[in-house]
Amino acid sequence: MNYCSHCGSADLVLRVPEQDNQERIVCANCQTIHYQNPKVVTGCLPVWQDQVLLCRRAIEPRHGLWNVPSGYLENGESVEAGARREVREEAAAEVEVNYLITLYNLQKVNQVYLQFVGNLVDGKFGVGPESLECRLFREDEIPWDDIAFTSSTYTLRAYFQNRKLGTQTFYRASFPELSPGLPIS
Amino acid sequence: MNYCSHCGSADLVLRVPEQDNQERIVCANCQTIHYQNPKVVTGCLPVWQDQVLLCRRAIEPRHGLWNVPSGYLENGESVEAGARREVREEAAAEVEVNYLITLYNLQKVNQVYLQFVGNLVDGKFGVGPESLECRLFREDEIPWDDIAFTSSTYTLRAYFQNRKLGTQTFYRASFPELSPGLPIS
């Protein structure tokens, strides 16, 4: 941020506003406080019979690696609707959102991941424009060394743990403490 | 937003960027895309014995009404740490976060509420600068008609439902569909 988005002044300062306790970017000209807050990344692991659907990324970062369909929540959208949209965009597929499986804090980049488990409708999928390919994997086929993000590794571990135990347990973690209560694969 | 925060130009346009499918504010001068995304509101309902702690708001909106301590998640903070901070700021109290009880979408103002249940440490609390008063309530004392936000009503209903059933069920809803599986008080 180089200029105030309200008045256009370049006179931005870092200070603690009145009745606040954190430093903010404040415009010294018009006094607008420019708050910056984390973003929600919403996603869904589509399940079909004994398999899960992953997408191989056609975009940076982590081009070529596998991921649980996920992306930034948009204004005006519920977390569930955002998760369905991401599956549609990345895998050209429809899911029925089933349950929230993980909350994963990635504080170093100001992201909060919320990922669901969903049912892949009719087992149908394609390849979205942000994906090189999409594929169903059985548990013993998961490419653990080629997963794009730790959030996806966490959700995959949580899902297979739940499936083994017959539970719908919700898991919370913060990077880099990946695996509270989860077995390390 | 009147000016580009990157280059200071007032030549902002609303258009769908390449490889996107939604309208964004784009600077016609430097081509910066100004994404706008929902914010996370994190909070915690502090529990002490058979009572819960609420805060009466000293600030707008909903000045004078009762609330579950909550506020915007900050950059660099986990959702859990944010919830503890909000309890500290609003009620001058410490909580041990216990479990996530609600995800509540308030799409009309681009907010996602994540509220926890926590244990009020030593039953101690004060009154933070954003509160007129803080008070412990038994279930039959909750001022249902004077709760500040529907998110708080939802979390309170969910908590008393869980307490009655001896569960730690996690509930999801979107305004205005308030009460999936929850009894209306």
Image (spheres, coloured by chain):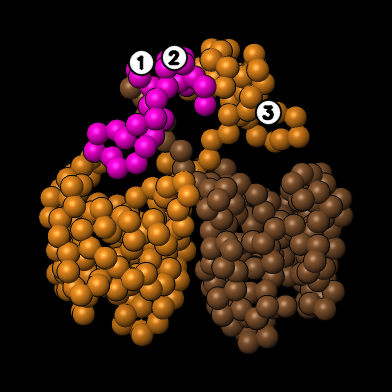
Chain colours: A orange, B brown
Query: Which residue in the structure is indicated by mark 2?
Result: B9
Query: Could you say which disc has been placed on residue A69 in the image?
Result: none
Percent x, y for residue B114? 56, 59
Q: Is residue A63 shown left or right of residue A39?
A: left
Q: Is residue A95 shown left or right of residue B116?
A: left
Q: Label 1 crowding class (10 Å Cα cut-off): few <14, some 14-19, many 20+?
A: some
For disc 2, the chain is: B
Does the magenta stretch mainly form a helix, a strand or a loop?
A: loop
- Region of the chain picked out in magenta, as a range: B1-30
Q: Is residue A173 shown left or right of residue A183?
A: right
Query: Which residue in the structure is indicated by mark 1?
Result: B29
Residue in front for this viewpoint, A109 or A128 = A128
Q: Is residue B85 highlighted in magenta?
A: no
* Res A181 visible: no
Percent x, y for residue B151? 64, 61
The mark that comes first in sequence, 1 or 2, is 2
Residues under labels 3 and 1: Cα distance? 32 Å
Secondary element type, mark 3: loop
In this rendering, the answer to whether A62 lies above or below B171 is above
Q: Are marks 3 and 1 in contact (CB under 8 Å)?
A: no
Q: Label 2 crowding class (10 Å Cα cut-off): few <14, some 14-19, many 20+?
A: some
Secondary element type, mark 2: loop
- Residue occupying the point 53% across, 63% down: B174
Residue in front for this viewpoint, A88 or A151 = A88
Query: Which residue in the structure is indicated by mark 3?
Result: A16
- Residue occupying the point 42% across, 50% down: A73
Secondary element type, mark 1: loop
Three-letter amino acid code at disc 3?
A: Val
Q: Nearer the viewer, mark 3 or mark 1?
A: 1
